Each structure stands twice: as C-alpha cells, then as structure tokens.
C-alpha cells in the first residue's frame, strides 16, 4: 500500500475517536482518564473551554501520529497486515506515552503534585499511568492498542 496522507489522517481521526470513547468508558468506571482535560489545562484554566481545546488537541495528535505510522509503514515497505503492524506500533506508542506521563508534572502548569494541589489542578497520571487507578497501566496500553488497530484497519480498508 502506498502512503496516502489523507487516508492516514482519516484513519488517525477514527482511531482517536475510538480511543477517546474507551477513555470515557474508563472514566465512567471510576478511572481518572480525562486526556482532553489534561491537555486543555496546559493552556487554559480547568473548565469546559479547556476540555474542548484539549479534545481538539487530542484529535489532532491522533491524526498526526497515524500519519507518522503510515509514513513508517511505507518507508519500511509494509504493504499487508497493516492492523497487526499498527498494533505493534501502538504498543510502542503506549510505552513512550507512559514514560511521558511520568514527566508531565514537570511540563504541565496545572498538574497536581505532592507540593501543589487544588480544584484548578488535574491529576498527574504517573509513570505508565500508575496514578490513574488500579488498572491504569493496562488502560494506557489498551487505549493505545484500540487506537492503533482501529486506525490501521481504516487505513487498510
């Protein structure tokens, strides 16, 4: 399959929508997985506007990341079994994101830490999502795999 940026962007959007829905289900089950709010509060105070801006940021990141996936598929000569390869890339992506989660308090101006907390703060996810709840690390991997497999399937279709 030749690299197609528009198809990759659409696939990334589809994968990110599914990922966001899975995270919303996790929130309904008591996990603290609100990536739109976490991203939005990097630029705005906690509230509805921050959530909307964060959702837009999350959707754009999903599009860009899958464009990178698709470009790598093309560069590596991967022409078939795209959803399977995408799952492998998603697992690596989850690991990198999990490490990044551990560093977020150093970068995020409104992230709760041991020394700074309050109603305007968002919870720190911790390394690999360990502070998101008992299932945090598994959820971090699961949502990235869901993103990657759905995006890979859409891209391959």
Image: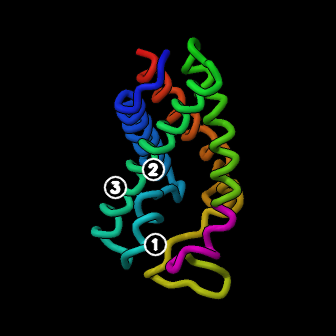
Q: Which of marks 3 and 1 is nearer the N terminus?
A: 1
- Label 3, on which residue? 56
* Colouring of the image: rainbow
Q: What residue does disc 1 label?
A: 42
Front residue (pair 13, 18): 13
Above or below residue 134? Residue 113 is below
- Residue drawn at (50%, 25%) of the image: 152
Circle 3 — which element? helix
Give the labeled residue for mark 2: 61
**SS label for mark 2:** helix
**In the displayed image of the protein, which residue is found farthest to the top?**
80
Q: Earlier in the sequence, mark 2 or mark 1?
A: 1
Q: How far apart are marks 2 and 1 (CA)?
A: 15 Å
Magenta stretch: includes residue 107: yes
Q: Residue 122: x percent and y percent?
A: 50, 72
Q: Distance between the residues labelled 3 and 1?
A: 13 Å
Callout 2: few (<14), some (14-19), or many (20+) C-alpha neighbours within 10 Å?
A: some
Q: Is residue 44 left or right of residue 33?
A: left
Q: Main secondary structure of the magenta part?
A: helix
Tell me residue 125's x, y (percent).
61, 62
Q: How far apart are marks 3 and 2 (CA)?
A: 9 Å
Q: Give the range drawn in magenta.
A: 101-110
Q: Residue 130 in the image: state x and y as whole percent.
A: 69, 58
Is 123 situated left or right of 76 in this image?
left
Q: Mark 2 or 1, which is nearer the eye?
A: 2
Q: Is residue 81 above or below residue 118?
A: above
């Amino acid at each position: 399959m030749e690299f197609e940026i528009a198809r990759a962007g659409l696939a990334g959007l589809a994968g990110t929508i599914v990922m966001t829905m899975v995270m919303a289900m996790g929130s309904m089950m008591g996990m603290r997985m609100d990536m739109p709010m976490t991203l939005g509060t990097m630029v705005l105070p906690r509230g509805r506007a921050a959530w909307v801006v964060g959702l837009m940021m999350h959707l754009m990141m999903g599009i860009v990341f899958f464009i990178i996936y698709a470009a790598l598929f093309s560069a590596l000569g991967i022409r078939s079994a795209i959803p399977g390869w995408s799952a492998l890339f998603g697992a690596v992506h989850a690991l990198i994101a999990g490490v990044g989660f551990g560093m977020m308090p150093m970068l995020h101006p409104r992230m709760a830490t041991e020394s700074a907390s309050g109603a305007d703060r968002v919870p720190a996810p911790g390394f690999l999502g360990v502070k998101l709840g008992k299932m945090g690390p598994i959820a971090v991997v699961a949502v990235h795999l869901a993103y990657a497999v759905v995006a890979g399937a859409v891209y391959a279709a």
